[in-house]
Amino acid sequence: MGGVPHIDLPGLPGIAALLARYPLTAAPLNDLAQTLLRGPSPLSPGEREAIAAYVSQRNDCAFCAGTHGAVARYLLDREGRSADDAEADPKMRALLAIAEKVRLDGRSVAADDVARAREQGADDRAVHDTVLIAAAFSMFNRYVDGLATVALPSPEAYEGHAKHLAENGYLAPPAG
């Protein structure tokens, strides 16, 4: 991300600037994020944030990768796990492999990929949620980067925002 967005935006980083400038699209996008990352699912909020962070990192979206990586670390810690634990979990590895295929081309997800995830303990809802998170975050990443929104200046800058998102979800206004 460069220093100047492609369109006139308020001085906020990443998707926050787009949501503030375009409230009509902000509401459904926030609802989608809330449903995907905090709604009912066999995957924990930390696991879902880790999938969002993984897809965002693989798409080189600095703002989304930084934000959701920090939220995932916070939530996984609250769940008594670390990001390393989640990455080492065979079920999460199988789901991240599916997320990677969705990120590149959803048609490349094969029955064998889903069977592998099922063998590791994922049910149909976990596979569904993984595919939808990967697809949605590819869209969010392209939205943020396609308009050249600005990233936060350092990895540490994401931590405060992450705590708010982890504790309040995606519908509560940011503290400040």
Image (tube, helix red, strand yellow):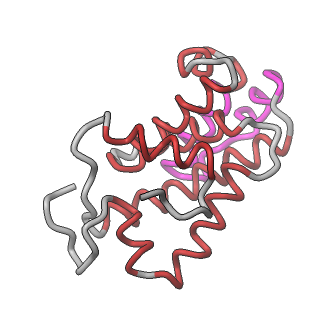
x and y, in percent, of residue 12 in the image: 30, 64
Relative to 61, say whether 46 is above or below. Answer: above
Coordinates of residue 61 in the picture (x, y in percent) = 35, 49
* In the displayed structure image, the side of residue 151 where residue 83 appears, left or right: right
Residue at the spot x=27%, y=52% of the render? Answer: 151
Seen at 38% across and 72% down, the residue is: 18
| Residue 34 in the image: above or below residue 64 | below
The residue sitting at 27% across, 76% down in the picture is 9
Which residue range is magenta in the image?
A: 93-121
The outermost residue toward the bottom is 24
Residue 157: horizontal and vertical position, in percent?
31, 41
Main secondary structure of the magenta stretch: helix
Pick the front one: 72 or 143: 72
Residue 170 occupies which quadrant of the picture?
bottom right
Q: Can residue 58 be spotted in the picture?
A: no
Q: Is residue 159 visible?
A: yes
Image quadrant in which the N terminus is located: bottom left
- Which one is in front, 57 or 99? 57
Identify which residue, 95 or 169, lies in the foreground. 169
Residue 105 among those drawn in magenta: yes
